[in-house]
Image: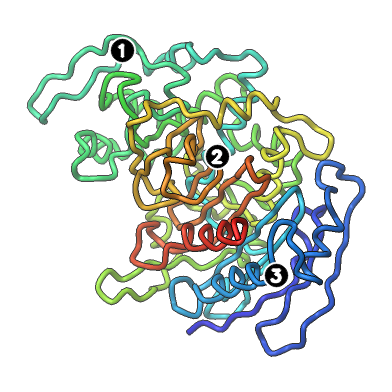
């Protein structure tokens, strides 16, 4: 059993209010501490309601009992051995309703997890790159019906794979478009699974092991598409291609562009493709679940690099738009708050509200399920689709999940996740480091959501 301790959340975004939670390490209940920063007007909403929640248990809209259940369940993930460390935050109307943390970011040194812990966010990189793409869209750099080859000529003339390895590749009816690239319907793949017809090609070309984005594009250009453009949804290297497009149209590296347009303006000081040497000790340990025993096994840095990303400075640099970033909970919360604000943060408009709405609008046929680790549940559900670089709940009434209408979300390979619910004006972020996301451990995403929405609906 991992020891755990819950502490006050002092630094989330540097602007959200802070609440001192009760100690799980034997201390007395602490008086609530509420702080605010008047400089950040989009974040300075409903300060008094937060104080009421934490002191008198009034509904605004959560109860003290519900929040205690949520906090206790986060700690239980660690106590039960489902994760060595967990870091979560629930934000409603721009206010921190609950921050919870449990476990150790480094089990060898017994360093507790904190708001400064750095997490490998893997596919939670995708929404960030998606926002960067839509900033270029708003600038008129591309149209949604533009062919991808307009920006990446190497990807013109791609053919479609045959039904078996001996079959000839066939010509598609047309080239894939930018919208299809943003929606994972262009015909690309990841080659992860043995039943994927493109798996042998992706493995042979070592596409995800490319040293840089130019070589990545060269390798992708040598393999076929999985299906006709627009015919179906398939989780893919599409966002890495978006990263290459960003580099080509801006003349900057992907990392430079994200730093200039998103990380610096949003104050995401600990997010990037590389972790400085002086900060590397803040990275959370990674764990793999033994499929036989169900126990967590700590991974070495070399083993973690086998998942396709090396974060140390000086390592070969492949700035993967699909899975390459490391971040902290406060940093990712700033990104989520910008989206929850309709594209604005700290007086700056990053995206127009209608562009955010476009990104979170389902573009798939309503009968097409999603099957991917990025989902909030293990498999596709009715009422769940995909927009532009976000999964979306487009019909909450038909969905067996608890999320509100229009909720948009994604997750990462190491089991991190987030969702933003515009119907209830709230979002939730969870950081853990358990590989893979479908490991036989507790369903972090659904368990916490069920508690949150049960409290909302009481």
Q: Is disc 1 placed on a helix, strand or loop?
A: loop
Residue furthest to the front: 458
> At x 48% / y 58%, what residue is drawn?
445
Q: Is disc 3 placed on a helix, strand or loop?
A: helix
> At x 20% / y 45%, what residue is drawn?
194
Residue 149 percent across, percent down from the top left: 42, 14
| 3D distance between C-alphas at marks 2 and 3 | 25 Å
Q: Which residue is mark 2?
A: 405
Residue closest to the eye, 371 or 134: 371
| 3D distance between C-alphas at marks 3 and 1 | 59 Å
Q: Is residue 383 left or right of residue 86?
A: left
Which mark lies nearer to you, 3 or 1? 3
Is disc 3 surrounded by few (<14), some (14 to 19) or many (20+) residues within 10 Å? some
Q: Is disc 2 placed on a helix, strand or loop?
A: loop
Residue closest to the eye, 422 or 300: 422
Which mark lies nearer to you, 1 or 2? 2
Q: Which residue is mark 3?
A: 64
């Amino acid at each position: 059993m991992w020891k755990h301790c819950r502490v006050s959340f002092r630094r989330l975004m540097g602007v959200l209010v802070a609440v001192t939670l009760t100690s799980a390490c034997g201390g007395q209940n602490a008086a609530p501490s509420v702080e605010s920063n008047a400089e950040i007007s989009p974040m300075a909403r409903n300060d008094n309601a937060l104080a009421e929640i934490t002191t008198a248990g009034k509904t605004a809209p959560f109860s003290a009992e519900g929040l205690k259940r949520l906090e206790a369940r986060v700690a239980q993930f660690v106590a039960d051995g489902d994760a060595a460390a967990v870091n979560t935050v629930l934000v409603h109307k721009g206010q921190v309703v609950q921050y919870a943390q449990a476990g150790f970011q480094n089990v060898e040194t017994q360093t507790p997890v904190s708001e400064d812990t750095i997490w490998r966010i893997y596919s939670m990189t995708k929404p960030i790159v998606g926002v960067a793409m839509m900033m270029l869209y708003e600038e008129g750099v591309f149209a949604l019906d533009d062919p991808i080859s307009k920006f990446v000529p190497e990807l013109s003339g791609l053919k479609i794979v045959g039904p078996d390895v001996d079959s000839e590749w066939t010509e598609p009816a047309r080239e894939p478009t930018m919208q299809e690239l943003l929606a994972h319907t262009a015909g690309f793949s990841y080659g992860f699974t043995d039943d994927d017809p493109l798996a042998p090609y992706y493995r042979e070309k070592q596409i995800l092991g490319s040293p840089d984005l130019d070589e990545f594009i060269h390798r992708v250009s040598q393999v076929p598409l999985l299906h006709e453009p627009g015919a179906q949804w398939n989780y893919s290297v599409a966002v890495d291609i978006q990263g290459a497009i960003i580099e080509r149209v801006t003349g900057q590296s992907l990392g430079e562009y994200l730093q200039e347009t998103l990380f610096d303006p949003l104050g995401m000081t600990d997010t990037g493709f590389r972790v400085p040497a002086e900060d590397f000790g803040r990275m959370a340990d990674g764990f793999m679940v033994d499929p036989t025993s169900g126990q967590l096994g700590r991974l070495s840095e070399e083993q973690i690099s086998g998942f396709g990303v090396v974060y140390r400075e000086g390592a070969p640099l492949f700035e993967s738009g699909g899975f390459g970033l490391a971040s902290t909970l406060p940093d990712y919360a700033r990104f989520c708050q910008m989206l929850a604000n309709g594209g604005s943060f700290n007086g700056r408009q990053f995206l127009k509200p209608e562009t955010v709405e476009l990104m979170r609008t389902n573009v798939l046929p309503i009968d097409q399920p999603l099957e991917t680790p990025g989902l909030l549940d293990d498999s596709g559900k009715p009422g769940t689709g995909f927009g532009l670089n976000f999964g979306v709940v487009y019909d909450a009434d038909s969905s067996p999940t608890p999320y509100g209408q229009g909720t948009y979300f994604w997750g990462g390979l190491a089991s991190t996740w987030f969702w933003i619910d515009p119907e209830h004006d709230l979002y939730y972020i969870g950081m853990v480091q358990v590989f893979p996301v479908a490991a036989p451990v507790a369903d972090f995403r659904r368990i916490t959501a069920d508690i949150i929405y049960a409290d909302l609906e009481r």
